């Protein structure tokens, strides 16, 4: 490791089905939210998409407040 690099653990990425289970929503509803621009931001992992765990937590907290 180079002197200026910091060794930090990678953040966990939830698959869309994992996120849906955690949020207690269906995949279809997730797709509806995404079409409305209301779903959490996703990241690409190869050919798949997922939600960063921190993003999922923030999104869930924001939905509780609404």
Image: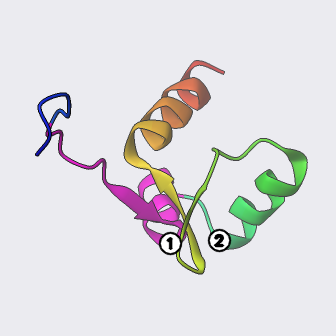
Which residue bears the numbered disc 2? 27
The structure residue drawn at horizontal position 77% and vertical position 41%, both measured from the top left corner, is 38
Residue lying at 65% horizontally and 71% vertically, measured from the top left: 27
Q: Residue at x 41, y 61 (%)?
A: 14
Between 27 and 51, the residue placed more toward the observer is: 51
**Mark 1 Cα within 10 Å, few/some/many (few <14, many 20+)?**
some
- Above or below residue 52? Residue 15 is below
Task: Judge from the rendering whether residue 22 lies leftward or rightward of residue 64; answer left or right.
Answer: left
Left or right: where does residue 28 sit relative to residue 10?
Answer: right
Which region of the structure is painted magenta?
7-24
Q: Residue at x 53, y 77 (%)?
A: 46
Residue 17's tag is 1
Is 66 rendered above or below residue 37?
above
Most distant residue in the bottom direction: 47
Dividing the picture into quarters, in which one does residue 6 lie?
A: top left
| Nearer the observer, 23 or 14 | 14
Whether residue 65 is in magenta: the answer is no
> Which of the 4 image quadrants contains residue 31?
bottom right
Q: Which structural element holds mark 1? A: helix
């Amino acid at each position: 490791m180079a002197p200026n690099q910091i060794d930090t653990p990678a953040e966990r990425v939830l698959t869309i089905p994992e996120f849906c289970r955690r949020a207690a929503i269906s995949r279809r509803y997730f797709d509806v939210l995404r079409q409305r621009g209301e779903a959490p931001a996703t990241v690409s992992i190869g050919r798949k998409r997922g939600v960063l765990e921190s993003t999922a937590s923030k999104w869930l907290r924001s939905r509780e407040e609404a």
